[in-house]
Image: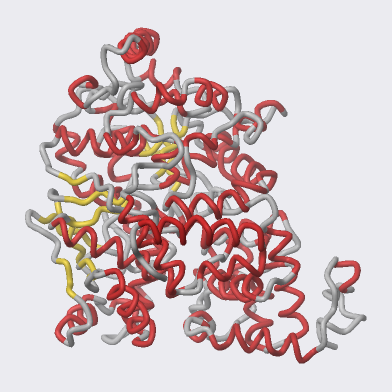
Amino acid sequence: MTVTDERSAFYKNTKVAGFDDVPFEEKERLFGLVKADMRFPDYLYGCYECGICVAACPSARFYDFSPRRIAQAAAREDIELIYQQMQEDVWECSQCFSCVRCPRGNNPGGIITILREVAVNNGLASAREALEGYSRIIYKIMSTGTQVSPDMLQPDAFPDWGPEVKDVSDNLDMWRRALPPETLHTTSTGWDVDEKTLLELYLIWFHTGALDMISEVDEGLHMILQEVMEERLEDAGIEV
Amino acid sequence: MPIPVDALLKKKEHFDRGEHDPRSEDFHHELFKLEEQGEWIVHRAPDPIVPVETKYGVIKKIPKAHLWHHKSCGQCGHIPGYSTSIFWVMRKLGYDYNDPRDQTSCTAWNYYASATSNAAAQAAVAMRNFAAAYETGYFPLIHCGTSYGHYKEVREELMHHPELRAQVREIMGKLGKQMVMPEEIVHYSEWFYAMRHEIAAQQVRDFSGIAATVHPACHYYKLVEGDAIYDPDVYGGQRTAIVTGVAEALGAEVRNYSTWFDCCGFGFRHILVQRDFTRSFATLRKIERMKEEADPDVVLTHDTGCVTTLDKSQFAAMAHGRNVGVPVMSEAQFAALAMGAHPYKVCQLHWHSADYRPLLEKMGIDWEAAWAEFQQDLKRLESGEKQYLTWEDVG
């Protein structure tokens, strides 16, 4: 009995799990992309089933998630299960890499990074869902070169972080001007990034295909990013 | 709760891994071989150097001065006293540095959160920053634990995958940049560990009555685990020595707790859009365990995400009557306070959430007076007398 057998305790009906089934060939193609990643052979060597990765894993404590199952499915090339994991499990990982204490030298967290990348590149429902509400973060990092900014600290966005968030928000401009490092007087970026530096970053996004990846999960965001970047590059006389 | 160091060492006596244990291979051989082959320039760590030992015995060179500060998104954005304290301590010790604008994020927080990038882009971002540092002559010092861990991973990938090197070289060519790899990838907490005795020599506040628990950042010592500092005098060499070594050098009592190896619960994506997980893990597996088993005055850690997660997660848990309520800060802020730094003008503790005031009182700091001083400075900004506070203003 395999884990994708309906009698298996691990089986999840795709309809219940919330994603559409696709032909086996498509699942095989997706796994082919995972295996083709140059890092894949460095991340997987086999599995003793010792479970030390699960014991160390924070996500395993709060989700129906197991880094051991990720490594096992990849090692057995269980196409059905890997597809199911790409549609569900991979977004539960914390990417802390506590699982790399594996005695076989596996890197389940690294396998998940690749699985996620393939999920994003192919516009899988799980990627679209997981990144809902995350667009502004992608916009911030790709367009400004810093990931979080002081003005993101708003009470309605972080109500669970206590009243200090409102204090920061109310006094933001003054408190930033009170910081002695000159690069930290910014409010909409973490620090002051040069225009030339930013343009170089844009070229990296264009030339590595990282910008195009966004189009598969959020077409609107991709359009905005492309427009912003092309305009600034054109203004600087740089052709992409 | 003592750490069974003797039992661990005795157990390890039975192992003989032989001369060719791949774990203790020194990556520097490959690094310099690639330089000889013209693949990249190795940016040498400048003198003066403090040599330190890493997990499997490879010596790492920590430069004392002439450092290019690769800043951190979360530190600069949400806990700016973290970065400010790093700069302040370096200035107090009299070492020169460069605080660049020609630096981008490593972008790894986003990569680990959303996977909306790829190996080539991540490597190119790293190499662009390394080249920018090289152009200034200053050596990179990485503030963020995730940047540090990610850059070590990138170094491994670039060393072992010629096709990736070729791809990144082409992109660097388009940017007009050289391929440069630093001789060492150095985290700021390694600098603090290497400088701990110089820091302690300038200590003006007594920390002998302060009990601390340490949370080590996963991406510091779990990614490319061999390249992290271990010291036989700290935890018997069985755990990474950074942070703990600094706290002990400052006279604080570092207490043990059972979930030391657990992550903080940051989760990259989770901290921003799925915080129920982050809050639960941070409070149930870390803060409550520390409180119950060690009852610390402060939690010390050394990464952006860890400070934010462990600090900010406590507010909601407190509303539910959980056993939380302990201040969280970086060892950089802790060391700065030991050296006499202002809690608000330098350490910027007003950006933190868990109540730090009892800790300041225990350190002998009149926080009410300090807050009044800070408010006075703000009035100078408000009145237009000054546009910004400078290093001269903060002491």
Residue A87, how many percent across, how many down? 74, 71
User: How many marks are shown on the rendered structure?
Assistant: 0
**Is residue B191 shown left or right of residue B116?**
left
**Residue at 18% across / 22% down in the picture?**
B392
| Camera sees residue B169 | yes
Against B146, is B165 above or below? below
Against B302, is B268 above or below? below
**Residue at 59% across / 72% down in the picture?**
A117
**Residue at 14% across / 33% down in the picture?**
B201
Q: What is the residue that sits farthest to the bottom in this orientation?
A: A25
**Is residue B251 shown left or right of residue A7?**
left
**Is residue B291 shown left or right of residue B256?**
right
Against B221, is B248 above or below? above
| Camera sees residue A96 | no
Against B257, is A73 above or below? below
In the picture, the quarter occupied by the C terminus of chain B is: top left
**Is residue B221 shown left or right of residue A55?**
left
Residue B189, how many percent across, how many down? 30, 48
- In which image quadrant can residue A130 be found? bottom right
Depth check: give the residue in front, B194 or B161.
Answer: B161
Q: What is the residue that sits farthest to the left in this orientation?
A: B47
Depth check: give the residue in front, B177 or A163.
Answer: B177
Residue B366, how many percent across, how many down? 35, 11
Depth check: give the residue in front, A72 or A15.
Answer: A15
Q: How is the image coloured?
A: secondary structure
Depth check: give the residue in front, A173 or B157.
Answer: A173
- In which image quadrant can residue B344 be found? top left
Residue A174, how many percent across, how many down? 40, 21
